[in-house]
Image: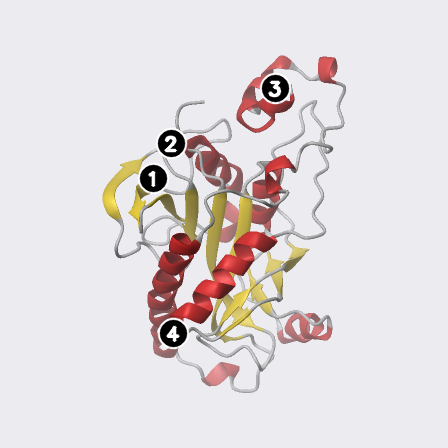
């Protein structure tokens, strides 16, 4: 593998398409064994660290959550040499305590999607990664510290429920999810977390609350203008938080993310089809 072009990946969600302060900026339009990512990666230096930024839905917000090529997006980061990904995502709140403008550093997920591919494996190679703790605790701690330093109201744990979309929930669904104790609801981050774990890349989500989900009695009175105003404020806060997180990031990883596949590969080595091994070489090559 060539020398890394970036060490930290940043995925921008709704309303976040660039990061002020990024220097030596250039773009990298990549192809992967799983197709083309959402957008060219924006490479540069932020506070002395090499980063790669990807607009999840494409610049201009062109791609539905169900249309996202999650495998290509994560594989592209891997191709660039990224070892950690900070993912920013607009979400709805399922608890009164998470107000519009708050950030939640997610540590758990619930999957309610139905149409998505969320593994690199298959076609003759079976792997089962541990996913009890779906985000990197080390990276989440850095993100939480950055929120505190930036003065952004945040919570250091929470459950993100990922729905298929593109429609929002019904009130019955929203109240069901609240009965489960879920904190926030969105449409994108779970597949990213699963694929990052398989790729042995650290991953953490900063969920940015835009409004209360439809369970809230004041939900229907919220205007589009109010939501856009919160989105813009969240984007400004996210840029500050990401910049601080990048600056505070430890140089070396001490977590287990880098060895997630060590005991996960189940298929007898001489039974793996050559074409499958070639497609996954960047991810599994060190184990073969």
Left or right: 267 as drawn, with respect to 134:
right
In this orientation, does residue 166 appear?
no
Q: CA distance from mark 2 to mark 4?
A: 32 Å
Q: Residue at x 31, y 43 (%)?
A: 42
Dividing the picture into quadrants, the one containing residue 283 is top right
The residue at which mark 4 appears reads as: 230
In the image, residue 124 lies at what x, y percent? 70, 22
Query: What is the quadrant of the C terminus in the image?
Result: top right
Mark 3 or mark 1, earlier in chain: 1
Q: Pick whichever of labels 2 and 3 is earlier in the sequence.
A: 2
Q: Secondary structure at mark 2?
A: loop
* Left or right of residue 88: residue 271: right
User: What residue appears at the point 36 percent right and 44 percent down from the top-left corner?
Assistant: 51
Q: CA distance from mark 3 to mark 1?
A: 26 Å
Rendered position, 168 above or below 211 = above
Q: Which residue is mark 1?
A: 40
In the picture, residue 217 is in which quadrant? Answer: bottom right
Task: Work out how far the residue at label 1 is from the one at label 2, CA to CA, in angstroms.
Answer: 7 Å
Q: Quadrant of the N terminus?
A: top left
Residue 76 point in image, percent of width and height: 44, 35
């Amino acid at each position: 593998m060539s020398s890394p072009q970036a060490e930290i990946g940043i995925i921008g969600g709704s309303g976040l398409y660039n990061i002020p302060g990024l220097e030596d900026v250039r773009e990298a339009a990549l192809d992967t064994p799983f197709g083309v990512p959402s957008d060219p990666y924006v490479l540069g230096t932020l506070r002395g660290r090499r980063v790669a930024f990807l607009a999840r839905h494409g610049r201009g917000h062109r791609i539905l959550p169900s249309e996202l090529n999650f495998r290509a997006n994560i594989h592209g980061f891997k191709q660039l040499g990224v070892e950690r990904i900070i993912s920013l995502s607009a979400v709805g709140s399922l608890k009164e305590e998470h107000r519009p403008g708050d950030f939640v550093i997610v540590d758990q997920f619930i999957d309610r999607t139905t149409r998505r591919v969320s593994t690199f494996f298959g076609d003759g190679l079976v792997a089962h990664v541990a996913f009890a703790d779906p985000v990197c605790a080390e990276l989440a701690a850095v993100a939480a510290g950055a929120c505190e330093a930036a003065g952004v109201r945040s919570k250091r744990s929470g459950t993100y429920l990922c729905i298929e979309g593109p429609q929002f929930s019904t009130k019955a669904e929203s109240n069901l999810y609240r009965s489960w104790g879920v904190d926030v609801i969105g449409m994108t981050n779970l597949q990213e977390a699963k694929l990052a774990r398989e790729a042995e890349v650290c991953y953490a989500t900063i969920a940015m609350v835009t409004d209360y989900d439809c369970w809230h009695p004041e939900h229907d009175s919220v205007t589009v203008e109010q939501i856009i105003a919160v989105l813009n404020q969240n984007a400004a806060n996210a840029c500050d938080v990401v910049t601080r997180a990048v600056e505070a990031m430890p140089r070396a990883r001490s977590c287990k993310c880098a060895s997630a596949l060590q005991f996960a590969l189940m298929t007898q080595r001489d039974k793996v089809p050559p074409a499958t091994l070639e497609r996954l070489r960047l991810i599994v090559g060190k184990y073969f």
